[in-house]
Amino acid sequence: MTEDARFEEGGEAPLRLKALDAEDLAVISGLCQDAVFPATEMGWDQSARRFGILLNRFRWEDAVSAERRRDYERVQSVVAVEDVVKVQSQGFDRRDSETVMSLLSITFEPGTDGGGALLFTLAGDGAVRVEVEALEVLLRDVTRPYRAPSGRVPSHEG
């Protein structure tokens, strides 16, 4: 007889997720909420039609354990968007290496023929709009987890 795998057993495994519809994207958005990154860690490769962000993601998937016995963690992750035709930003200078962004959500605004726009909403009235021919977003952890510098769960309370 075999047992089902438990959620806790996957705690150290790096994430590698793909979103092909709005429901999938909601999962990636939730996992990326409160991720932080310098404005200079965003890039658009026009010839490859790919937009990406290297961010420091809070490990929400590990933070909810009732039997937590270690520090809260972050991990460096890449969010890559395929089939990009246009990228726009507002509310910040993308060339300013001192500007640290905090990602609040990623949503999809459907257009025609499967295309549309991804909206990366940032704290402090910043936003990045990425127009795509089709929805395809990849989230991939690229480093081992590390102790969250604050030692706490991110909070939005004033």
Image: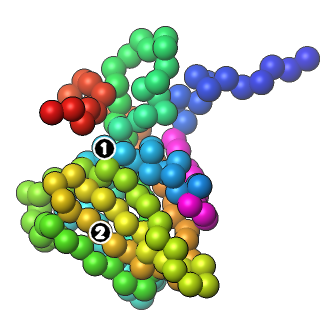
Describe residue 84's horizontal placement relative to residue 57 as left or right. right
How was this image coloured? rainbow
Q: Mark 1 = which residue?
A: 34
Placement of the N terminus among the 4 image quadrants:
top right
User: Is residue 144 on the magenta stretch?
Assistant: no
Q: Earlier in the sequence, mark 1 or mark 2?
A: 1
Work out whether residue 69 can be spotted: yes
As drawn, 92 above or below 78? below
**Residue at image coords 31%, 50%:** 104
As drawn, 37 above or below 5? below
Residue 128, label in figure: 2
Work out whether residue 37 can be spotted: no
Residue 78 in which image quadrant: bottom left
User: Is residue 17 on the magenta stretch?
Assistant: yes
**Residue at image coords 47%, 28%:** 62
Mark 2 is surrounded, within 10 Å at the Cα level, by few (under 14), some (14 to 19) or many (20 or more) other residues, namely some
Magenta span of residues: 14-22
Describe residue 56's horizontal placement relative to residue 59 as left or right. left
Point out residue 95 in the picture as x, y percentages from the top left corner: 13, 71
Point out residue 35 in the picture as x, y percentages from the top left corner: 31, 46
**Residue at image coords 12%, 70%:** 93
Q: What amino acid type is highlighted by mark number 1?
A: Asp
